[in-house]
Image (spheres, rainbow, N blue to C red):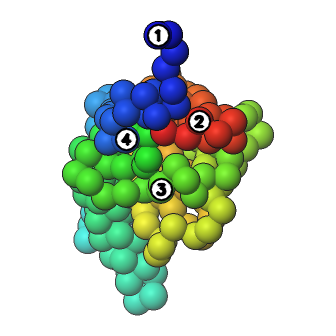
């Protein structure tokens, strides 16, 4: 009797829902990002109140941009409170919202010239993964592209991108788990 493991044995050892990588938003970047955008909103609104322009269009512009900046700062703060997990089957938020399924991933790009967020990576999909979603400062998805990064730790994002690449190589080699 041999001690050889079959592919089925190896697959049984790996839980598809096991978390193999995590990207936790960096607290300092999170505070800086939301604070900077919020400060811009406060400045625009204070200019509108203290020094209202004579032209009504400029006043409306200042108020809309100020309120929009404040809203974006709040959305960024909320979105970056949730870490991202990688399992063998999907990239998802900790709350369960699926960003993309690994079976749908065509490639991962974190190169210098890739159009990607700071400290992040770009995932190209075979098929669009549902509606466009934007979690400011953390990830967004539109069409066949998913971008992860922003206020994330560069080393964690690099590790998750590398793990996705490994999963893709395993899938291509016929060892998909």
Circle 1 sits on which residue?
1
Q: Nearer the viewer, mark 1 or mark 3?
A: 1
Structural distance between the alpha carbons of marks 1 and 4? 29 Å
Q: Are marks 4 and 2 in contact (CB under 8 Å)?
A: no
Relative image position of residue 160 (x, y in whole percent): 49, 32
Circle 4 sits on which residue?
16
Residue at x-position 37% and y-position 41%: 16
Q: Nearer the viewer, mark 4 or mark 2?
A: 2
Circle 2 sits on which residue?
175
Lower sequence index among marks 1 and 3: 1
Q: Which residue is most to the right?
A: 113
Q: Is residue 162 left or right of residue 156?
A: right
Figure check: 63 above or below 151: below
Q: Between 44 and 37, which is closer to the camera in this rendering?
A: 37
* Residue 100, disc: 3
Lower sequence index among marks 3 and 2: 3
Structural distance between the alpha carbons of marks 3 and 2? 20 Å
Lower sequence index among marks 1 and 4: 1
Q: Using the rendered view, name the quadrant where residue 170 is placed.
A: top right
Residue at x-position 44% and y-position 47%: 89
Q: Between 144 and 9, which is closer to the camera in this rendering?
A: 9
Q: Which residue is most to the top?
A: 2
Structural distance between the alpha carbons of marks 3 and 4? 15 Å
Q: Nearer the viewer, mark 3 or mark 4?
A: 4
Q: Is residue 86 visible?
A: no
Relative image position of residue 76 (x, y in whole percent): 33, 53
Relative image position of residue 102 (x, y in whole percent): 52, 49
Structural distance between the alpha carbons of marks 1 and 3? 42 Å
Which type of secondary structure does the marked residue at label 2 adopt?
A: loop
Residue at x-position 34% and y-position 61%: 72
Figure check: 133 above or below 122: below
């Amino acid at each position: 009797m041999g001690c050889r493991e079959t592919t089925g044995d190896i697959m049984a050892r790996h839980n598809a829902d096991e978390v193999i990588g995590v990207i936790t938003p960096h607290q300092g970047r999170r505070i800086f990002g939301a604070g900077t955008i919020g400060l811009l909103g406060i400045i625009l609104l204070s200019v509108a109140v203290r020094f209202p322009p004579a032209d009504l269009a400029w006043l409306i512009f200042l108020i809309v941009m100020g309120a929009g900046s404040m809203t974006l700062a709040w959305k960024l703060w909320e979105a970056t409170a949730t870490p991202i997990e990688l399992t063998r089957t999907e990239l998802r938020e900790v709350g369960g919202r699926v960003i993309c399924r690994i079976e749908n991933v065509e490639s991962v790009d974190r190169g210098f010239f890739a159009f990607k967020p700071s400290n992040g990576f770009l995932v190209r999909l075979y098929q669009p993964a549902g509606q466009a979603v934007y979690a400011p400062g953390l990830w967004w998805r539109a069409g066949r592209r998913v971008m992860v990064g922003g206020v994330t730790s560069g080393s964690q994002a690099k590790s998750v991108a590398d793990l996705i690449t490994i999963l893709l190589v395993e899938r291509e080699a016929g060892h998909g788990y």
